[in-house]
Image (tube, rainbow, N blue to C red):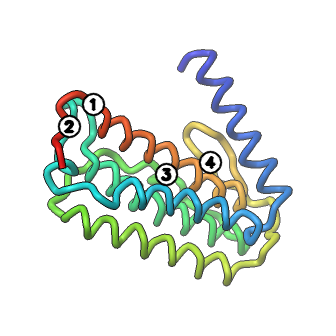
């Protein structure tokens, strides 16, 4: 990892923890939901051919990115729920590896939509200002408390939405 990457990860860790300290789950919720809605908009008109296409063998397809977001989101939600109630949380599987899927892009879209709804239900059931301890470690951003992990979901959705947009802009991307 370069010095610049370390600095960027440290800056993001500080942002997540500080914003999480300042804001309740309810106050963070609109930011997270807005990012999910933008992600869904990004996926809305993607065809099966487009979703399965990747610019190179080393690049992820849109379906692979969508599946990664979904799997990670479910893991992050479990971490938020555990930490918000004072329990420890296992964050070891938070960055699921690249995985192919035969699921239609419409199914992935629906699962991501439903996952957003599940986030809302989960957040409504939690203490709005849970303790800042315990924390769980993120491999790049270090120790994060419950509300920092909640806000991380926004960052993760937006980061991978940008990845999807890059695939759409790549040379050779199939026409609709």
- Tell which tag, 3 or 1, sits nearer the viewer: 1
Label 4 to label 2: alpha-carbon separation? 37 Å
Neighbourhood count class around disc 4 (C-alpha, 10 Å): few under 14, some 14–19, many 20 upward? some
Q: Which mark is residue 170?
A: 1
Q: Are marks 4 and 1 in contact (CB under 8 Å)?
A: no
Label 1 to label 2: alpha-carbon separation? 6 Å
- Give the residue pinned by disc 4: 137
Q: Is residue 47 left or right of residue 20?
A: left
- Tell which tag, 4 or 1, sits nearer the viewer: 1
Residue that protrudes farthest toward the right in the picture? 22
The front one of 93 and 127 is 127
The front one of 122 and 162 is 162
Give above or below for 26 relative to 76: below
- Give the residue pinned by disc 2: 173
- Give the residue pinned by disc 3: 92
N-terminal-most mark, 4 or 3? 3
């Amino acid at each position: 990892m370069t010095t610049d990457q370390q600095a960027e990860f440290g800056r993001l860790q500080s942002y997540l923890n500080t914003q999480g300290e300042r804001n309740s789950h309810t106050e963070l919720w609109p930011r997270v939901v807005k990012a999910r809605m933008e992600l869904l908009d990004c996926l809305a008109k993607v065809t099966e051919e487009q979703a399965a296409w990747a610019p190179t063998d080393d690049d992820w397809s849109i379906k692979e990115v969508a599946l990664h977001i979904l799997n990670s989101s479910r893991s992050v939600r479990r971490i938020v729920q555990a930490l918000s109630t004072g329990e420890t949380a296992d964050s070891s599987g938070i960055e699921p590896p690249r995985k192919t899927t035969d699921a239609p892009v419409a199914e992935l879209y629906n699962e991501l939509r439903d996952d957003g709804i599940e986030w809302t239900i989960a957040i409504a059931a939690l203490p709005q200002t849970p303790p800042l301890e315990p924390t769980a470690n993120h491999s790049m951003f270090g120790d994060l408390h419950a509300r920092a992990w909640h806000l991380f979901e926004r960052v993760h959705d937006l980061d991978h939405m940008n990845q999807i947009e890059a695939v759409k802009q790549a040379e050779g991307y199939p026409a609709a």
